[in-house]
Amino acid sequence: MSADVIVVGAGVIGAATAFHLSLLDAGDVLVLDRDHVGSGMSSRSSALVRMHYAFGPEVELAVRSDQMFDAWPQLVGAPHCVRRTGFVRIVLPGEEPQLRANVAMQQARGAKVELIDGATLAEVAPGLVAYDVTWAAWEEHGGYGNGSVVAGDMLEAARRGGVGYRPHSAVRSLLRRGDRVVGVETDAGAELAGTVVLAAGVWSPPLLAGVGLRLPIEGELHHVAVLKHEAGRGARVACIDSTTQTYFRPEGSPETTLVGAFAGSPIDLPDSAPPGPDPAELAAIAASASRRVPALQDAGITGGVIGVYDMTPDARPLLGIVPGLDGLVVAAGFSGMGFKISPAVGEALAELVTTGDSTRVDLRPFRPSRFDEGEPISPPFPYSDD
Ligand SMILES: Cc1cc2nc3c(=O)[nH]c(=O)nc-3n(C[C@H](O)[C@H](O)[C@H](O)COP(=O)(O)OP(=O)(O)OC[C@H]3O[C@@H](n4cnc5c(N)ncnc54)[C@H](O)[C@@H]3O)c2cc1C
């Protein structure tokens, strides 16, 4: 069999790409997943939605995605998928000048973000210690979603638009003929395609290696704790807090808060993660976050998640074609930030596949060859722990 475009992987990135391909003149599009839609790292995602980045094109991807999240019912025919709790970014003491510069840059790109002082932080984010904060970035429209839901919604809409989907269909290898990827080899045989979009998340490196590409993607294991506390006393907003090296957000009910940590541990890709979370790690994350959210001090740990980030050297994704190898579009290495930008990444990749360029958001800074070319992404006002 053959298709015009094969998308490998039905996480948020593959599903978004398939959805946007269904809106364009892309011909026959087929999505293959070795498991099922939204079952990969998208299902483990803490799924924070924020515009706060230090690199302009990332802000543009987040802003564009947020517009699509706002229009979700009209766009994909499913209920709204983001809970708008508000989002706070607290930086390390001394990094307020970078915060100020980044907020100005974000506002210039259409992000709904403002600087607030500690007193205002105490008002908008009850339950958070605010006395040590001079300035923070506040996004009233920020919040969180759910990776499996977003992947499922977009794939469902793609299928209504004519996209084919085959779950439980593992791609064993990409098929290469000369300087071109011409399809994929599956358990059921070869599938030829004009273009293959590789969106297999942390499972992408071995497929790339099979066609001679060694892109710099390393695994990093992350723990996320779900904590139960007195109702209404935990996190009521989503927050990334450099001073405690944690992020947190409400988790559905007023009695639960989800907490993750900045730091992870190196892990071989793709399938060497332990079967479940380490209770000691979960307790350590809870203790760190409780310095910002005191109600977490005596909270019980009711659940935990482990997931793997696909890290690149500059912690930004690899998006686009690889010079010298036609027929392949790479969408991997999302470095723990792929959820909130997925709708816009899919839109840009679909445009790239169908026209050879991406005009709404410029993907060139994210090109997979940037490290070989000595041009890793380097924002003008980085945070020391970003
Ligand atoms: C713990 C954790 C917390 C996170 N928190 C956030 C956050 O707060 N905000 C944010 O924006 N991002 C966050 N992220 C990152 C975000 O979740 C990921 O970047 C995003 O979900 C990756 O989507 P994906 O489609 O690239 O990969 P996946 O969702 O992993 O999808 C890849 C798919 O490919 C399939 N596949 C793999 N190999 C093959 C094969 N050989 N053949 C066919 N199919 C295959 C898999 O089954 C899977 O469905 C977090 C990630 C983790 C792990």
Image (cartoon, grey):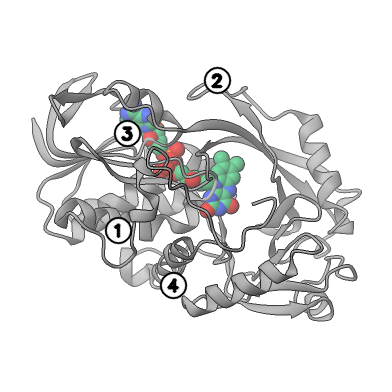
Residue in front for this viewpoint, 111 or 154: 111
Residue under label 2, please give it.
272
Q: Nearer the viewer, mark 2 or mark 1?
A: 1
Label 1 and label 3: CA atoms lie apart by 21 Å
SS label for mark 1 = helix
- Marks 3 and 1: in contact by CB < 8 Å? no
**Amino acid at pointer 3:** Asp
Secondary element at image label 2:
loop
Residue that mark 3 sits on: 33
Disc number for residue 348: 1
Q: How many marks overall? A: 4
Among numbered discs 3 and 4, the one appearing first in the sequence? 3
Sequence order check: which comes first, mark 4 or mark 2? 4
Q: Amino acid at mark 4?
A: Asp
* Mark 3 vs mark 2: in front: 2
Which amino acid is tagged 2?
Ser
Image-based side of 366 in relation to 47, left or right: left
Residue 137 percent coordinates (x, y): 68, 72
Provide the residue designation for mark 4: 70
Note whether 344 is above or below 9 in the view shown: below
Mark closest to the chain's N terminus, 1 or 3: 3
Instruction: Please tell me in which quadrant of the rendered image residue 255 appears.
Output: bottom right
In the displayed orientation, state which residue is furthest to the front: 374
Q: Nearer the viewer, mark 1 or mark 3?
A: 1
